[in-house]
Amino acid sequence: MSSYVEVDSAGTGNWHIGQDPHPGTLKILKDHSISATGLKGRQLQPDDFAAFDYILGMDQHNIMDIRLILGQTTHPKICRFFRFNRSSERRTRSLFHWRFRRNL
């Protein structure tokens, strides 16, 4: 499958540029025997629009930021992650809001 699918991650903000992945992410990668070597935070760039078939955002705010960064007001390759996996939307949204409230 890896010869057919390339996955990348980039933020819409600049606050994690150059940082290592989150400790929770590192644990999940380790649990699945996936190397984190060389992974560093980066910000979405206009060139990413041509480089990838899909640009996914977690929520409508992300989608708006992505469209602004990429200079694309509407395009079918920019969409919400849960367009492809609706079954985990509620669980992920709840976890995000719980962590956000907890860290305030």
Image: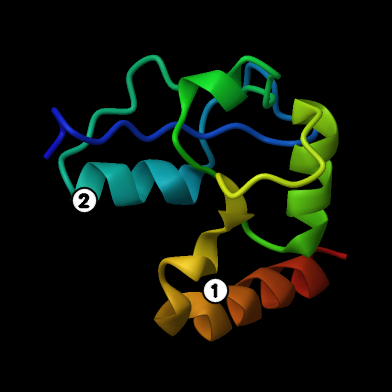
Which residue was labeled with disc 1? Answer: 92
State which quadrant residue 60 falls in: bottom right
| Viewport quadrant of the C terminus | bottom right
Colour scheme:
rainbow
Secondary structure of the residue carrying numbered label 2 = helix
Instruction: Classify residue 76 as left or right of residue 88.
Output: right
Three-letter residue code for mark 1:
Thr
Q: What x and y, as percent, mark residue 68?
A: 85, 35
Q: Quick check: 23 above or below 4? A: below
Three-letter residue code for mark 2:
Asp
Q: Quick check: 53 above or below 86? A: above
From mark 1 to mark 2, how far is it between C-alphas? 20 Å
Q: What x and y, as percent, mark residue 33?
A: 15, 40
Which residue was labeled with disc 2? Answer: 31
Residue at 70% in and 77% down: 98
Which comes sooner in the sequence, label 1 or label 2? Answer: 2
Residue at 53% in and 60% down: 81
Out of 31 and 46, give the one closest to the viewer.
46
Q: Quick check: 18 above or below 4? A: above
Residue at 77% in and 35% down: 72
Residue at 32% in and 51% down: 28
Residue at the front extreme of this rendering = 75
State which quadrant residue 99 falls in: bottom right
Q: Mark 1 or mark 2, which is nearer to you?
A: 1
| Viewport quadrant of the N terminus | top left
Q: What x and y, as percent, mark residue 89?
A: 53, 78
Secondary structure of the residue carrying numbered label 1 = helix
Instruction: Classify residue 79 as left or right of residue 101.
Output: left
- Disc 2 crowd rating (10 Å Cα; few below 14, some 14-19, many 20+) is few
Out of 25 and 60, give the one closest to the viewer.
60
State which quadrant residue 49 falls in: top right
